Amino acid sequence: MTRPAVLCRLGALDLDRAAALHAEAFVPFGERAWTRQDMAELLASPGVAGLLLQVEGADAGLAICRVVADEAELITLAVRPAHRRRGAARRLLAVVIDDVRAAGAKTLFLEVAADNPAAQALYKTTGFRIAGSRPAYFRRGGGPAADAVVMRLDLS
Ligand SMILES: CC(C)(COP(=O)(O)OP(=O)(O)OC[C@H]1O[C@@H](n2cnc3c(N)ncnc32)[C@H](O)[C@@H]1OP(=O)(O)O)[C@@H](O)C(=O)NCCC(=O)NCCS
């Protein structure tokens, strides 16, 4: 019997798994892996919530966002390589959008690396529009920092 995809809230018991999933997605870009402690501090900060997507019993993806007053920020979104191109990110993003809208956000912002066309395509097809840029925003061990494209989605 196959087990379906399950979405659950990221909680204190999921810190190691969430850190591993994040590292698997971002270390290949040269970014620093978040530790369990990083994850714990982030999830304990005001307005922050996370989602974990499991597919057939295995961790497949995560999303973490923050809501402050009427603005929300997608802090991170990651899908394990083995689960990509099957709609996992789209599913996570849809729930993030519903959640932050329900929490009162009117706009959802994010920063995506200028050299990450896969994520930019995901956001553009979800309705995000480019709102600006941040030069040398993403620090990458050893190499040059990558510029960020700031994107926004109007939720009203
Ligand atoms: C970006 C990422 C989250 C996409 O996850 P995913 O589950 O594979 O995405 P989905 O299957 O939901 O794809 C949704 C859409 O995103 C776009 N997309 C996703 N991967 C893509 C790729 N490799 N190339 C081009 N477009 C891509 C497509 O528009 C796709 O729709 P389609 O499959 O109908 O063409 C995943 O590749 C990832 O974790 N990458 C590393 C971490 C990262 O970049 N996170 C985002 C940082 S802001």
Image (spheres, helix red, strand yellow):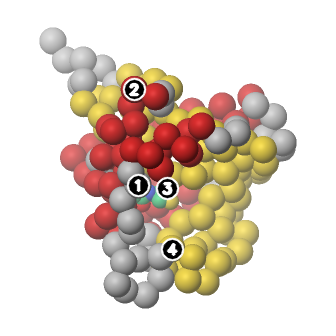
Instruction: Give x and y (percent) for residue 38.
Output: 47, 50
Q: Nearer the viewer, mark 4 or mark 3?
A: 4
Mark 4 or mark 3: name the one nearer the start of the chain: 3
Mark carried by residue 13? 2
Query: Is 97 left, or right, of 57 in this rendering?
Result: right
Upstream in sequence: badge 4 or badge 2: 2
Question: Quick one: which residue is furthest to the left in this view?
Answer: 1
Q: Earlier in the sequence, mark 2 or mark 3?
A: 2
Q: Measure the alpha-carbon separation of dots 4 and 1.
A: 14 Å
Give percent across and percent down for residue 104. Answer: 81, 34
Secondary structure state at the residue bearing disc 4: strand
Q: Which is nearer the eye, 139 or 71? A: 139
Secondary structure at numbered mark 2: helix
Asked if the residue under mark 2 is in contact with the one under mark 4, i.e. CB atoms within 8 Å, the reply is: no
Q: Amino acid at mark 3?
A: Leu
| Crowdedness near tag 3: few (<14), some (14–19) or many (≥20) residues, C-alpha within 10 Å | some
At horizontal 39% and vertical 44% (from top left) the residue drawn is 36
Tell me which amino acid carries mark 1: Trp
Nearer to us: label 3 or label 1: 1
Q: What residue is rendered at 47% in x and 82% in y? A: 145
Label 2 CB-ligand 1 distance < 8 A: no
Relative to 46, is 93 on the left or the right?
Answer: left
Badge 1 element: loop
Q: Which residue in the structure is indicated by mark 1? A: 34
Residue underneath mark 3: 122
The kind of residue on which mark 4 rests is: Phe
Q: Residues within 10 Å of mark 4 (few under 14, many from 20)?
A: many
Comparing 132 with 139, the one in front is: 139
Closer to the chain start, of discs 1 and 2, is 2
- Helix or strand or loop: what does disc 3 sit on? helix
Task: Kindly identify which numbered label has been placed on residue 138.
Answer: 4
